[in-house]
Amino acid sequence: MDETVAEFIKRTILKIPLNELTTILKAWDFLSENQLQTVNFRQRKESVVQHLIHLCEEKRASLNDAALLDIIYTQFHQHQKVWDVFQMSKGPGEDVDLFDMKQFKNSFKKILQRALKNVTVSFRETEENAVWIRIAWGTQYTKPNQYKPTYVVYYSQTPYAFKSSSTLRRNTPLLGQALTVASKHHQIVKMDLRSRYLDSLKAIVFKQYNQTFETHNSATPLQERSLGLDINMDSRIIHENIVEKERVQRITQETFGDYPQPQLEFAQYKLETKFKSDLNGSILAEREEPLRCLIKFSSPHLLEALKSLAPAALFSRIQKLLCYSASHSQGTQDLSSYVPLYTRC
Amino acid sequence: MEQANPLRPDGESKGGVLAHLERLENQTSRSRKRSEAQAQERVLGTKIQKLRHLRDDPRAALWHRRGSVKACIANVEPNRTVEVNEQEALEEKLENVKAILQAYHFTGLSGKLTSRGVCVCINTAFEGNLLDSYFVDLVIQKPLRIHHHSVPVFIPLEEIAAKYLQTNIQHFLFSLCEYLNAYSGRKYQADRLQSDFAALLTGPLQRNPLCNLLSFTYKLDPGGQSFPFCARLLYKDLTATLPTDVTVTCQGGEALSTSWEEQRASHETLFCTKPLHQVFASFARREKLEMSLVS
């Protein structure tokens, strides 16, 4: 086994926390059950790693096997990377998409290998019709750098692919071209959507965020939600508050639904607007050109935060602001079309 | 003194007149005030009475109702059996209605009105087997739009909606039903092949999300010496459950004997005309027959 391959496998295994080690090794399916049973996983980590490297050497692990282990590690630790979303499009009147996985893999690899002599491409298919592609980049004269790979998750027979953001930006156009040609599309465009959470990105672009539907079978009665009112207050004031709170809850439920929101960390809007003023001679109102500003909302979980604003009665103000900004915004169109809040105006 | 005298009668009369006027003035103002106060008192009095009525009438009504409810409850006890029968009848009706609504699923297309439109449910089936259900939640507004849905990403929902949703909603729903039923049918065939006829396959079944390209290798006699066949099925029509193009080749075939060539050609025709799992079922039956003939 090549020294570089051994080093690569060693560094990958060292990254894996001990409690995940057996699961990941089983998913890798390179070392047999018998071999794994000979390892004492309760030792110190260095000893465990040494033993595993020894077993890999016995079985003559190749660079491809090592790359596969790296893919599996990344699949378990998706949140450590930031994912961009790319959308491809076909020309008009194109034939039906007869996607052939073998053909796709061959084509993709060939395009990259023709352009850059030194590149390592590995694939791993998952059950949800997605293929994880790992690319380690080299140049005409240097071997591929296995420690800074790019990952692409492509959902076949859809126009969407997710790419891990990397610092090596100069290879992005080539990657885009390889993906487009191999999947028989014409164009590829980067969407204004970025997140650590692949599942949330999927929910947004595939529009799968709400999977509850009304049927005649699901006649669940409206749940009594405690509105947290002070019982000692005058009952007439409580009544007034209840009406308002119920209205707010109904609007929140219609807008956000009952399902868990996709996890977004920030949303950015470009706003171009003119000011209206009652006072004559206001400088802002007299401007000929519209004002351009950038509004950014950020939070560890943006949509849940917005949803919880409703009971805090800040809802209508935020709604007005966002409706206004959405009707004037340019760019970030995909995000605004997703969040139903913004399409209600 | 005399000066005062003449003044006095005048003074008295003047004082008298003025004082009298003053007294009269005071009298009128006092009486005016009194009458005002009295009027106000009367107004307030009527207001108080009104408020009292407002407070007392509902109270009275409430008491009255409580009394009547108590009376009702007292009366109801002996009539319980009648009520129970009524309740059972209602429950039966409810069950009937629920069953009818469920039966709509078998028609393939059903729906339920929602607060903003309708939630359409498409139940797919193939060869009498009820398969997956898909939902499309429509908002009835101008323009008509899809709120959310459970249609898989690779079904061209947006294209169908762009063509038909605004102009002819029936056509939209039927077209979508076609695509979904065809997809379910193809998926069913591929799943059955993988699960029921794994013994005849010599390698894994290659498939894609839409199940419109299937590639596999199979042998008619699993333990035997014959060469395996390679089949490649293309379904270019996404509304069909049978392939449009079939290629069957024989692995390791240089010059194939005519019998193999005949078999190969007949397999191609079979795959084009019958569902996949049925073709394999016929292979399995033939194999069993041959085995029983040999032994």
Image (cartoon, coloured by chain):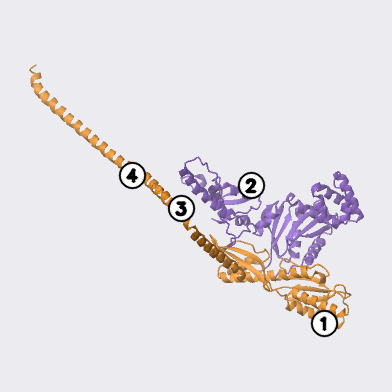
Chain colours: A purple, B orange
- Residue occupied by mark 4: B50
What separation in Å lies between label 2 and label 4 (alpha carbons)?
A: 59 Å
Q: Chain of mark 1?
A: B
- Please tell me if label 1 and label 2 are on a single chain: no
Are there few (<14), some (14-19), or many (20+) residues within 10 Å of tag 2?
few
Q: Which residue is mark 3?
A: B73
Q: Nearer the viewer, mark 2 or mark 3?
A: 3
Q: Quadrant of the C terminus of chain A?
A: bottom right
What residue sits right under mark 1 in the picture? B262
**In the foreground, A75 or A142:** A75
Please tell me in which quadrant of the rendered image residue B53 appears.
Answer: top left
Residue type pointed to by label 3: Ile
Is residue A223 found left or right of B153 in the rendered image? Answer: left
| Residue type, label 1 | Glu
The answer for how far apart the CA atoms under marks 1 and 4 are is 105 Å
Mark 2–mark 3 distance (CA, rounded to whole Å): 60 Å
Nearest-to-viewer mark from 1 and 3: 3
Give me the disc on residue A298.
2
Where's residue B279, x and y in %? 76, 76
From the top left corner, tell me how far across and down residue B199 is, in percent.
82, 70
Residue placed most toward the observer, B265 or A204: B265
